[in-house]
Image (cartoon, rainbow, N blue to C red):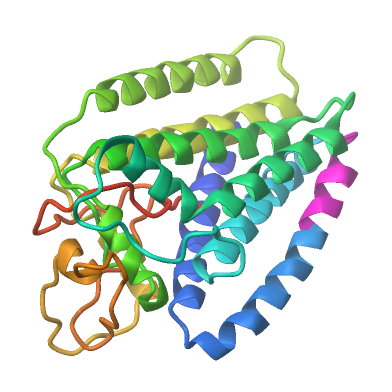
Amino acid sequence: MAAYAVPAVYAVVIWWFSTGVIILLDHRPRHTHRWSMAGGTLVLAAALWAIATSAADTSETGAYMAFTGALLVWGWQEMSYYMGFVSGPRPTGCPPDTRGLARFRAAVGTSLWHEAAIVVGGLAILGLTWGQPNTFALWTYLIFAAMNLSARLNMFLGVRNLNAEFLPDHLSYLACFLRNRPMNPLFPVSVGLAALVTLWLGQAALGEGLGAHEVVGFTIITTLMALATLEHGFLMLPLPSAALWQWGLPKVANPVPSTAENACGASGRGGDLSDTGAPHRPALARGQHASAEPRGLPAEPRGVA
């Protein structure tokens, strides 16, 4: 049992802690972000080295290194976006009268360079692990990328829990793209497919004849997939999931509720909401309810983010 429990606990703890650290750094004063990003880039270099080194390592340690390296690469992607270094050509929100494809294009414009960076990161990991026996870094990164995209599309269509309180003040305009709905057509498909993949990975982890490396690796990515599926559930379930990372948020005295639409104003530009209980970043799914039905695509959900 310990052969499965230890890697599962490791995956949960490092996922939870790294997400909280990034939330904490994102909400630090803007002048600290360049230093955080510089440190994060050094960590990125170390993570890529760990992935390259572990690619030929079929020990238990190799599986842990691969997972941790990929998670840190994903963490850099999150930091670079939420600190405003790699985002997109559109630094404004969505005008209130925008509908349909125009709304989608506006949303994509807020994170286009970020999406490209995610692809580049995936290609880099693919190159580092190509033809090698240890591909758990690639599995890990693909799970983060796929479930992140799924959550974003669901929030574009509308979810019950927006958790806009996780958005840093300098990205408050992204609250315009949040949409509050009790359900959307994509959600059951997303959760159903995610659950099937989780079961498939779980069966692989429990397969006969596996070595210690495979047991650790498949247990970790099964746990990660289960966490991502659970976070999807938090998008709809009335659970206080945001409390998991409350320690990463700044303390706000007497916050005033704010709707996402008010955050944008008529022009679609985010105002300075630092004194009014500004909406903050939605995670992959952090469970609190929004108070209005604004229009559009959310900021990228988190699940290291």
Decide which of 14, 49 is in the foreground and name it.
49
The structure residue drawn at horizontal position 54% and vertical position 40%, both measured from the top left corner, is 144
Residue 45: image location, x then y, percent: 81, 61
Specify the quadrant of the image occupied by residue 164: bottom left
Q: Main secondary structure of the magenta part?
A: helix
Residue 102: image location, x then y, percent: 35, 42
Tell me if I can see residue 64 in this picture: yes
Residue 265: image location, x then y, percent: 20, 70
The answer to whether 49 appears left or right of 61 in the picture is right
Q: How many marks?
A: 0
Q: Is residue 113 above or below residue 103?
A: below
Q: Is residue 170 above or below residue 116?
A: below
Residue 170: image location, x then y, percent: 41, 76
The structure residue drawn at horizontal position 66% and vertical position 83%, both measured from the top left corner, is 35
Residues in magenta, as a range: 47-57
Tell me if I can see residue 223 in this picture: no
The answer to whether 222 appears left or right of 56 in the picture is left
Decide which of 241, 115 is in the foreground and name it.
115
The structure residue drawn at horizontal position 20% and vertical position 49%, both measured from the top left corner, is 161
Q: Is residue 160 magenta?
A: no
Q: Is residue 214 above or below residue 52?
A: above
Specify the quadrant of the image occupied by residue 271: bottom left
Q: Is residue 49 magenta?
A: yes
The structure residue drawn at horizontal position 20% and vertical position 29%, both measured from the top left corner, is 184
Q: Is residue 41 above or below residue 116?
A: below
